[in-house]
Image (cartoon, rainbow, N blue to C red):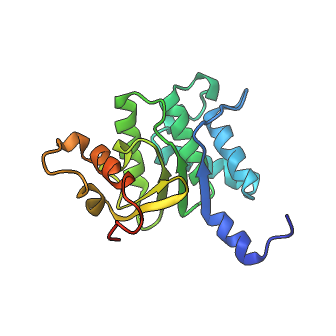
Amino acid sequence: MGDLTSRESAYLKQVAWMPQTIIPMTGLTAREQVAYTGWLKGMKKPEAWDAALAALDRVNMADRADVKTKKLSGGQLRRVGVASALVHGARILLLDEPTAGMDPTQRRVFRDLITGLATDEVRVLMSTHDVADLAEEADQVTVLQQGRITFTGATQAFLAHASQDTPAARRAEAAYTAVSALTPAQNSW
């Protein structure tokens, strides 16, 4: 890959990615792991160190900043992953299957956290196979089937694909099933 233009470099500094699996770095505390990510994104060491604590505070983990990442629960490690994405001031967060493997309580806490972060300051783009993740939090939904977009639009328009007698807790799943059966020509977006 050649040298990045200044515009490409500026763009990349605004984007952060949180992978599906957050790997605890051996021997590092939560703050050290987040600061290391900041350093990798081009921050100076003291700046990354201070920003790491602020990022951990944003995800309600400041009290665990000095705990080794190997000792954190799965939900706490996910929050370290979000802090790592936020440490350098990203405006766009790309989250890959952010609630995979979480129990229902951890999922609710994590979704509340993401909803709180999704502001005019930070935009969140989430890739998920669990449609329950999008029912309450998402403004927009795009459904891909075998590399083709079968739906894109507002969440309410997506949920409208579920039959009216579908229980509220199953609407997103029913809408996904209905949309998945459509061809792009049948979809009204």
Tell me, yes or no, if residue 123 can be seen here: no
**Does 167 sit above or below residue 43?**
above
The quarter in which the C terminus is drawn is bottom left
Q: Is residue 88 above or below residue 114?
A: below
Q: Position of residue 80 (x, y in %)?
A: 56, 39
Q: Which of the image's four quarters has the N terminus?
A: bottom right
Q: Nearer the viewer, residue 38 or 184?
A: 184
Q: Is residue 50 left or right of residue 112?
A: right
Residue at 68% across, 52% down: 38
**Front residue (pair 129, 188):** 188
Residue 180 falls left or right of residue 19: left
* 181 shown above or below 19: below
Residue 174 visible within the image: yes
**Left or right of 160 on screen, residue 56:** right
Image spot of residue 106 (x, y percent): 40, 32
Q: Is residue 63 above or below residue 14?
A: above
Q: Position of residue 127 (x, y in %)?
A: 50, 50
Residue 148 or residue 154, whichever sits in front = 148
Q: Nearer the viewer, residue 166 or 90?
A: 166
Q: Residue at x 42, y 49 (%)?
A: 114
Q: Residue at x 25, y 56 (%)?
A: 161
Query: Furthest residue to the top?
Result: 71
In percent of width and height, residue 15 lies at 61, 61
